[in-house]
Amino acid sequence: MSALNPYRPGLFISLEGIDGAGKSTQLQAVVDVLRAADREVVLTREPGGTEIGEKIRDLLLHQTMRPATEALLMFAARQEHVLQVIEPALLNGVDVVCDRFTAATLAYQGGGKGIPTERLDALARWVHPGLQPDVIVLIDVPPEVAAQRLAQTRQRDRFEQESVDFFVRVRANYLQQAAAAPGRWLVVDGTQTPDSVQKIITEHLSNTLQVVEAK
Ligand code: TMP
């Protein structure tokens, strides 16, 4: 049983950050720490993670739409993801490492696009009542740094094409969420080398596992 949430056995970990933060590089490291501790792990992503979710992802990343449509589609994809993948894994004692979760909707559609937090919170309560990650890793970089990294990307999706101002708001929202729940969030300075970022994340998760497995 997870010491962090005694009602279900698997650990739920999500990674967050603005586009260009270097999140993808760290996902496998998180999986590796858990597997090294003999834990079974599912690596998945949002939007996506199911057949329907991946179709919705394609729309979200490439089709122009209103912010409210965007928020609703994020939660539509999440509903399938939670019911088909996340909850069954956690209930079977399998850890879930998720490339983004609801914190991203609060940051991007809330902070970035101005959808009121209360509406997003209400959707979250509907779609995944009582479920939230045990650990949320935020790889934090200034938007200017992220923009330089993204400039190297050849084909940028709809979100990656947003302005620096947009990412300033997204980042501020992430940092607010982290400050409001410091026990759940690990904020890592993503301007360090990938190896240094990885070391910090690995140490934090190793400590978390010690707590969980001591129970
Ligand atoms: P990714 O590039 O990290 O896979 O994420 C896809 C994009 O979707 C990324 O730019 C962030 C955005 N996104 C939101 O705007 N809201 C959400 O709830 C999620 C999960 C992702």
Image (cartoon, helix red, strand yellow):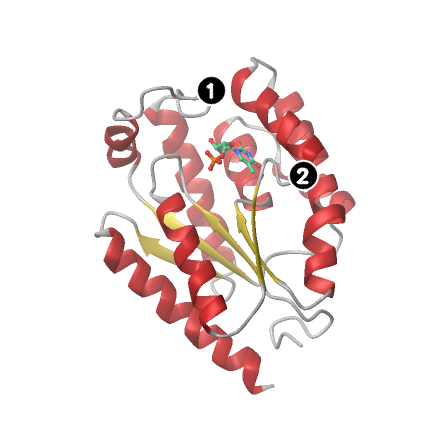
> In this orientation, which residue lies closer to the viewer: 83 or 159?
83
Q: Is residue 23 above or below residue 198?
A: above
Point 62% across, 33% down: residue: 116
Q: CA distance from mark 2 to mark 1?
A: 21 Å
Point 46% across, 41% down: residue: 173
User: Which numbered tag is attached to residue 45?
Assistant: none
Q: Is residue 105 above or below residue 213?
A: above
Look at the numbered disc 2 and give the secondary structure of its residue. loop
Residue 110 picture quarter? top right
Look at the numbered disc 1 and give the secondary structure of its residue. loop
Point 28% across, 29% down: residue: 147
Q: Identify residue for label 1.
A: 158
Residue 180 location, x and y as percent?
51, 56
Q: Is residue 196 above or below residue 67?
A: below
Residue 32 location, x and y as percent?
43, 63
Left or right, 189 with respect to 78, comes to left
In front: mark 2 or mark 1? 2
Other-residue count near label 1 (Cα within 10 Å), few / some / many at <14 / 14–19 / ≥20: few
Give the quarter of the figure containing the C terminus. Answer: bottom right
Q: Amino acid at mark 2?
A: Thr
Point 58% across, 45% down: residue: 101
User: Which numbered tag is attached to residue 50?
Assistant: 2
Q: Earlier in the sequence, mark 2 or mark 1?
A: 2
Residue 33 location, x and y as percent?
43, 67
Q: Is mark 1 within 8 Å of ligand 1?
A: yes
Left or right, 106 with respect to 73, comes to left
Residue 100 location, x and y as percent?
53, 44
Q: Amino acid at mark 1?
A: Arg
Q: Is mark 2 within 8 Å of ligand 1?
A: no
Residue reaching furthest to the bottom: 214
